[in-house]
Amino acid sequence: MNHLKIVNLKKIIMFSLFCSLLFSQSIVTQESYDSRFTPPQIGLPENMPYVKSLIWGEEGAFRKLNIGPETRIEELKLRRKMLQAHQWLGIVTLAGLAYQYDVGKKLYDGDDSDYWESHYDKHKAMGYFTYMTYMSTASMSFFSPPARKYDNNMNSIKFHRRMAALHFTAMMAQPFLAKKAVENGKRYNELMDAHLKAGTVAFFALSLDALGITFFK
């Protein structure tokens, strides 16, 4: 039964990665299509997200520090490049997280000392790697210039933002819980259980996010 669960999990992982690779340009393509005939002069979108306005608004931090392209057209080109990097780094992160989750689940459920000795350091190293790539991925989207326009209707981009809030929270919690578990021996099992649950939420939320971007227009 456990073998079947692992096989099914791997099939889901491979399917998610395949869809992400096949349609990884979805958000970028949508915005690029909308901007093909962008007029020479274009201003900032009226309904810019609040966090984005703090950075790129007329009184935003980057404007005051004179950071970024000189024209709005160049900003949109920069945005496209950053979102492409965001998507490819996301695929790398999802692949690493799939391996980390699979190994971590086996370490948590199993009692094989040989497996623990041979895989614990790999799990830990992959944890650092996925955390680094995840935060790099998030920064590409967070610091990218604002889009040409923002749609108030529910679409793949809005779905992506909502899912991002979920897996971002889980990714932030994971290292904190693992560190506290090592420091507090009395609550080790409790904190490691929470660590596993956070990893589960992060992995499946990110997988669902990838599928949502692919199929939810």
Image (cartoon, grey):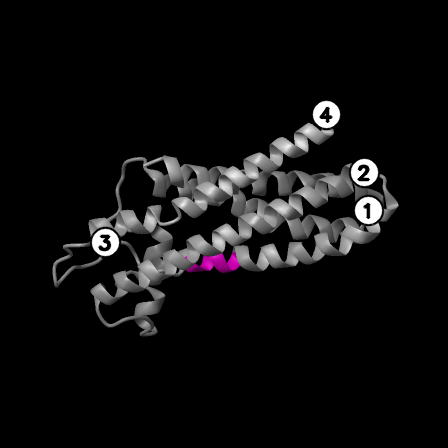
Question: In the rendering, at what x and y percent does residue 73 appear?
Answer: 21, 64
Q: CA distance from mark 1 to mark 4?
A: 20 Å
**Side (left or right) of 197 relative to 88:** right
Q: Nearer the viewer, mark 2 or mark 3?
A: 2
Identify the residue shown where x is 69% and y is 58%. Answer: 125
- Up/down of 23 relative to 53, above or below: above
Residue 115 bears which disc, if any?
1
**Side (left or right) of 206 relative to 39:** right
Residue corresponding to mark 2 = 110
Q: CA distance from mark 1 to mark 3?
A: 51 Å
Segment colored magenta: 135-140
Residue corresponding to mark 4 = 1
Q: Nearer the viewer, mark 2 or mark 1?
A: 1
Question: In the rendering, at what x and y percent does residue 36 appear?
Answer: 18, 54
Answer yes or no: do the residues labelled 2 and 1 have beta carbons within 8 Å?
yes
Among the two numbered marks 1 and 4 on one chain, the one whose residue lies closer to the N terminus: 4
Residue 148 bears which disc, if any?
3
